[in-house]
Amino acid sequence: MRVVRAAFRKDLLLSWRGRAQGMAVVVFGATLLLLLSFAVGPNATTLRQLAGGFLWVALLFSSTLALTESFRLEREHRAIEGLLLLGAHPAAIFYGKALANWLHLFAVGLALIPVMVVLYDPGLSGIGGLIGILALGTAGISAPGTLHAGLASQIRAQQVLLPLLLFPLVVPVLIAAVRSSSLLLLGDPMGQARSWALLLLAFNGIFWPLCGLLFGHVIEE
Amino acid sequence: MTGVVTGGWEFVWAAYGITFAVLTAYGIRLASHLRRSREHEDR
Amino acid sequence: MHGMPAPRTGPHAMNETLLAIEARGLSKRYGRNWALVGVDLRLPAGEALVVAGRNGSGKSTLLRVLAGSLRPDRGELRLLGEPHRKGRASLVSHASFTYDALSGMENLRITAQFLGRPSGREDLQPLLDRVGLGARGDDRVQAYSAGMRKRLSLARALLQDAPILLLDEPYGQLDPPGFGWIDRLVRELREEGKTVVLASHQVERLSRLCDRALLLEGGQRVWAGPAAELPAAFDRLEEVRSKAVAV
Amino acid sequence: MENLNAPPFSAKAVRRAWIALGAGLVLLAIGTYQGLFVAPPEHYMGEVQRIMYVHVPTAWNAMLALTFAFFCALAFLWKNDWKWDARLEAAIEMGVLLSLLLCIQGAIWAKPTWGVWWDWDPRLTTTAVMLVAFVGILALRHFVEDPRRRAVWSSVATVVAYASVPIVYFSVQWWNSLHQLQSSPQTVDGAMVTPLRINSFGMLFLLFAFTSLRSQIARRRLAAELAPPPAPTATLATGGER
């Protein structure tokens, strides 16, 4: 447990020190939100309908940037190998990194909400619930994301491979997050958002332990 | 579309045709790989 | 090994039979070629070994396998009588294991936190002073020269305080005073009863400083013996090679 | 960690595969003939329903191939035996091939039945997601030269991708809840069940044959990549100890 805390503090420090990249990821996400609305056209009602969907598509694409960045520093001078040589368990390093990535994606999501509200003008009542879904959804992206980012960072074609490996895995997160976000933003008469949130919880329940278990195989030569 | 579907044979042939064409092509590819690598080995 | 010098002081000196490193038939492949082929090694605890050989002879690979960063494709490895596990041997290699975006002090603090050691500034500053980075602790590693990076990774290894230290080209990139410092460091480590393995081209220097020596060529162990005889063995290897080339 | 050397190429397995291939083709011929000409057209679907005699067998065998890949991945991660890596490569390739065919058949089925090429049926959509996931794993295997890392990483990716199948299916089914009617009708009539079963076994033999052949090819490549190290020869004559 101590090692997880040390790893988490290390990754937070790295994210803080690299916050310029973090800003760039947010700008990338905001640009994506803008571009997506051009795909639909200025019709306010359709844009309001698609607000939840666009938010999560933008967040998903931004996540690949953040995840790739999270391993760049680890690979530069083989810092992650150094940590393993201290006798640190790979799963501890994984959870430190995955938690930091979760926090990072969550922050990016929070930063994108105002942009979405301005561009698509959804109802503001559901924002509280939306932040809860944001937390569950970004956790769902961060667990398999950190595993595959650790893997892709050791391969030449990592820009292509990370999305190709990650996106099919997070389809349930995308579906559940978009559905529950749209329900929260546009009104949820039958209270379905809660059951989507449970599905997100189940997804996290499966992948956080599984990815932690497998991470050792990914980074040890 | 719950009415009775009439005709449609072309769809049936299409489905079977593509399926067996792809499987045959894959089989041929396997056989050639096998023969090429065996020659490679016997030489 | 007849004619062993008097046993040293320190925890391991008493039971001479304890082997710090016991390796049989270590082989490691990189892509198509074998970087290490069937290397055997028996190093008693508390002794210093120099691993010599030309570039690409497998020195670095051997050290990374001994440390545990690389899993051998063949062969067995035991450290201090137990099956190998990471953390018992610290490695100082070409890669500095550091985070460029952070300062030297922060890098050390992370290492200390991972090891559960006190990580306050007052605990780490003496270590930075010892490796000659006292004044540069708060500068980012990005701005460090290769020599300073090497000193930082040496500080990391000292902080880890593992029973076995594996130093890959410790003299490389260091300035002349650094050479003298490395000699003193090796002697201090041996007084503390640590086992030290140095991979280096400084054949003359280390033949006086170490007890035993190992000569690698093309990933294979071509000679092993007392360190004093290393320079002679190295020359013989050159002769053999020059004759082979000439023929 | 003792890394066993490459699994031997076995001509016996290849011969067995050819026999299985022959049996499979015979069964498929019989099943297809019965399905196309003997079995009665389905009441609502008419002739289009005959696609089912190839669609359902492909579905079962695609899932079988991916399940086999999952166990090969687990076996390799646990036992580090290279024959599992060879079988993993074969099983993934067959899984991808059959999933691709399944999506094509599904699209051809949906056009006359629902008027659209893709009807977001939960099973078919899950197959499409798995198709992309396992094509990603084949791409991963392509980009990694070192045999050991290629084997370990594709095993890890296979385990994670397969573990996501149930939750992908469940979320698609829920997401698409308005479209309750399952796309494939119930097979009641005996004459409909027999061709289905014959074709399923025929496809199974085909799957077994192709997987065996493909894994033998993979073994041969591994043999080249995992050649054991040359015996240590060069030692200086004088000095040194054991």
Image (cartoon, helix red, strand yellow):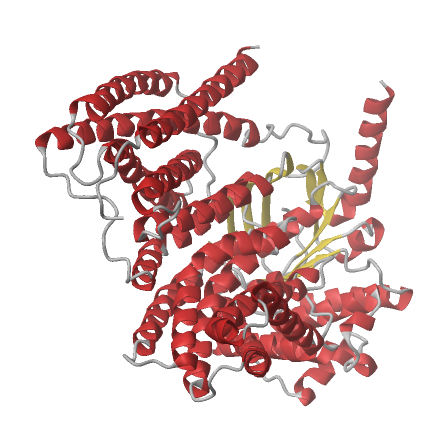
Pick whichever, C178 or C74, lies toward us: C74
Pick whichever, A34 or D174, lies toward us: A34
Pick whichever, A106 or D50, lies toward us: D50
Pick whichever, C62 or D199, lies toward us: D199
Rendering coords of residue D141 (x, y %): 53, 41
Give the residue displayed 54% in from the left and 43% down from the top.
Answer: D139
Rendering coords of residue D53 (x, y %): 24, 32
The answer to whether one can see residue A154 in this image is no
Q: Quadrant of residue A150?
A: bottom right
Up-down relation of residue C230 to residue C160 (above or below): above
Quick check: A97 left or right of A168? Answer: right
Rendering coords of residue A162 (x, y %): 56, 55
Query: Which residue appears farthest toward the right when viewing the image?
Result: C176
Q: How many marks?
A: 0
The answer to whether one can see residue C202 in this image is yes
Up-down relation of residue A102 to residue D221 (above or below): below
Quadrant of image for the C terminus of chain C? top right
Rendering coords of residue C107 (x, y %): 68, 75
Quick check: D202 left or right of D159? Answer: left
Quick check: D223 left or right of D210? Answer: right
